[in-house]
Image (cartoon, rainbow, N blue to C red):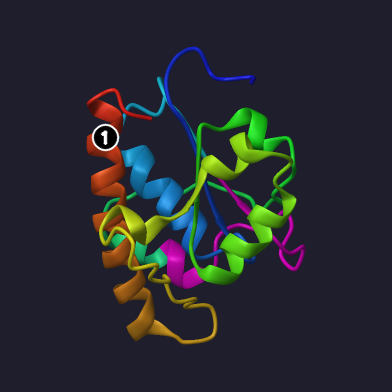
Amino acid sequence: MERDERGCAVLFVCLGNICRSPMAEALLKKKIEAHVHRVDSAGLDDYHLGEPPCGLTQEICRQNDCPIDHRARLFVAEDFDRFDRIFVMDADNLRSVLQRARNDDDRKKVSLVLDELFPGEHLDVPDPYMSGRSLIHVVYNMLDQATDRIAEKIKRGEC
């Protein structure tokens, strides 16, 4: 495995990589030393390749003093080698990523991000892309809490 020798490498994955996963990436980067640990996000579909996060995501991050700087990219099999943990946003993302896993080691890295808060409940982070302002706040709060938990683990040396 091509693990980052400096620390934990975390990848967040959603469908288009312009709402949920770049938001989670930005939140975790704000909470940990991003120069020590690698944090990134990716998407499963090529709808928005190269685009920045959607306007609502940028707006809510800005309102919460959470710098966000990302361009949408696709999840690739090599991400299993580059990252220690891969957090997906919903059950569809989970199925897609697990289908791309090459072996059990790859599969062990993948989990639903909300399982960090609600272990075993398999809850989805809803996709706010077409839902507007009200849902973006719900999603932000969910991911803020989940990345708090992930950051705590990383700071304790758990990856």
Query: Residue drawn 63% across and 63% down?
Result: 95
Identity of the amino acid at label 1? Answer: Lys
Dot 1: element: helix
**Left or right of 113 on screen, residue 14:** right
Identify the image quadrant of the N terminus. Answer: top right
Q: Position of residue 150 (x, y in %)?
A: 31, 42
- Can I make out residue 49 in this image? yes
Query: Residue drawn 71% across and 64% down?
Result: 48
**Left or right of 42 on screen, residue 130:** left
Q: Which residues are magenta?
A: 41-58
Query: Residue drawn 30% across and 74% down?
Result: 137
* Residue 46 is covered by the magenta coloring: yes
* Mark 1 Cα-neighbour bin, 10 Å: few <14, some 14–19, many ≥20: few
**Magenta stretch: dominant secondary structure:** loop
Q: Position of residue 102 (x, y in %)?
A: 74, 41
Nearer the observer, 66 or 6: 6
Residue position for label 1: 153
- Can I make out residue 67 in this image? no
Nearer the observer, 37 or 77: 77
In the rendered image, the vertical position of residue 157 relative to residue 137, given as above or below: above
